[in-house]
Image (cartoon, rainbow, N blue to C red):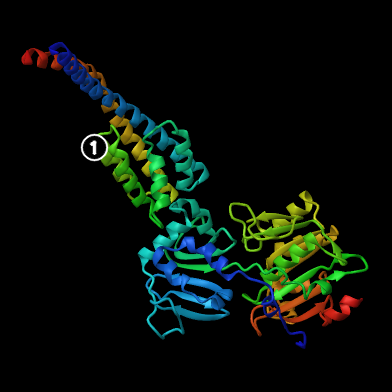
Amino acid sequence: MECSSKTNILTSFNKIHISAHSQLNSILPFFPLQLKELLKSFPTEELVELEEIRLRVDKPLVCQIGGKTFWITNSGELAKPFTGEPFFINAELLQKVVALISDGSFYAIETELSQGYLTLPGGHRVGFTGEAVIANGNLKTLKNLNGLNFRIAREIVGAADYLIPSLIDCRQERVLHTLIISPPGAGKTTLLRDLIRQFSDGIPGLLSGVNIGLVDERSELAGSYRGVPQNDLGYQTDVLDGCPKALGMIILLRSMSPKIIAVDELGKADDVKAILEIINAGVTILATVHGYDFYELKERPVMGDLLRSKVFERYVILSRRSGPGTIEAILDGEGFQKSPKNLWKR
Amino acid sequence: MKILGAILILIATSGLGFFGGMQLSRRVRELESLRNDFVFLEMEINYNATPLPQIFKKLKSINAQDSNSLWDKLLVVLNDGEGISTEEAWRRALEIFCQKSSLTKDDILILKDFGLGLGSTSRQEQLKKFKLIQELLQIRQQDALTKKQKNQRMWRSMGLLGGLALIILLC
């Protein structure tokens, strides 16, 4: 595939004011004093790109910044792995963090533990590992937790500005069926979130705001905390939180009469069936999928069938080549490259 | 002057007697109230999986009339202590609570034991704790009721009669 349209969304985000400290401040209450002091000492420029903070029992405190892994030292500095004196996490400290996350009520997060993650206020997510408790072949809960991963939610308003013109049919004033193909951590959720927000609120001169139904199975897009979306998804977006995608798409189609249905991370055969039903109902689909490029995806058993049925009118290929949010290509329904500028003028 | 002194002695000793009797009644009431609160806590955890601080807030408003509310003290301790565990908060709140409570040392010991592991285990384990504390409190309540029926009148009479005896001795 030709890779000419290489635009880094995140670079353009630098123009957008991101309150890095407020992002960190919203997760600080979930850390005990000792860890809080270490995290507070992070320089602002590092905070902007802070992606993850990982705590593992008897292992160094690790964070991921701009795709790179660092150890956090005893003095609160960032060091390359196996350099400096790292701050070690012990079981007691991890328990304290869990107590803070669960509001001192471990039983209250059992459902979340069975899913392996929990959403915090602000849309941040904590992933868990530990000893699995299995009941009837399913993960009932986790006990003796040994690892936590704080994933920092980054809502970037304007992330989709560059793409918007390519995804709208100006003559019919409608959004095209779009699939964002991206490897993990390349910004597909951030991009989809901003697309939803903009299509919901409307884009002056391009599109009037439309009703959008969002199935947020993993609470990543809306970052719902106790059912309330923490991220701005526009004023016309209805969020079905924690619902399986295939089921949720059909529910939204029947109950909320959306113009667009958005879902993150397609993959199951049921999802494909639901998408076909949605498209037949005249509703636009806005979706993402894990993948590296159009042709690789086309060879996959389930997604390949969907791609061959040519239901999508636009494919956006993302990568991390120049950092998260690198747009590798924008393709039409046949898989041919489109220039955003030409589409804009169409 | 002597009569005035005698009246004062009589008031003081009768007051002591009434206070002793009242403590017995208060203990019964406190145990009953606590047992009801634990039933509420159990239901909230069982049906809603509500986090403990939220249940404590509800219990605080339910017991708004109570000047020595354990739940109020718990909330204060939880809010003041940054990152404090629920178990530790329970221990500290109980220490403050028992200063003005009519509960006996044995009653407090049961409550202290209850605090161990509070909030830090699975729902099933927590529910077992709540069942146990309710049963233990019922036993204590029965004991308090028996003691009240047996000793309350005695305390009051002792106060009055003790005062009279003291007056006679002093005269």
Q: Is residue A343 above or below residue A172?
A: below
- Crowding near the residue tagged with mark 1, few <14, some 14–19, many ≥20 C-alpha atoms within 10 Å: few
Lateral position of residue A281 relative to residue A290, left or right:
right
Which part of the image, by quadrant, shows the C terminus of chain B?
A: top left
Can you see residue B106? yes
Residue A131 is situated, as x and y percent measured from the top left of the image, at 43, 63
Lateral position of residue B51 relative to residue B95, left or right:
right
Residue A330 is situated, as x and y percent measured from the top left of the image, at 79, 79
> Which of the two residues, B100 or A190, is positioned nearer the viewer here?
B100
Kindly identify which chain the residue marked by label 1 belongs to. Answer: B
Q: Residue at x 56, y 64 (%)?
A: A125
Q: Quadrant of residue A55?
A: bottom left
Q: How many marks?
A: 1
Q: Is residue B121 above or below residue B36?
A: below
Q: Residue at x 21, y 23 (%)?
A: B16
Which part of the image, by quadrant, shows the N terminus of chain B?
A: top left
Secondary structure of the residue carrying tag 1 is helix
| Residue topped by disc 1 | B106
> Which of the two residues, A22 or A270, is positioned nearer the viewer here?
A22
Q: Is residue B63 above or below residue A330?
A: above
Can you see residue A273? no
Lateral position of residue A48 relative to residue B78, left or right:
right
Q: Quadrant of residue B105?
A: top left
The amino acid type found where label 1 is placed reads: Asp
Q: Residue at x 84, y 75 (%)?
A: A333
> Which of the two residues, A249 or B102, is positioned nearer the viewer here?
B102
Residue A300 is situated, as x and y percent measured from the top left of the image, at 70, 76
Q: Residue at x 38, y 37 (%)?
A: B69
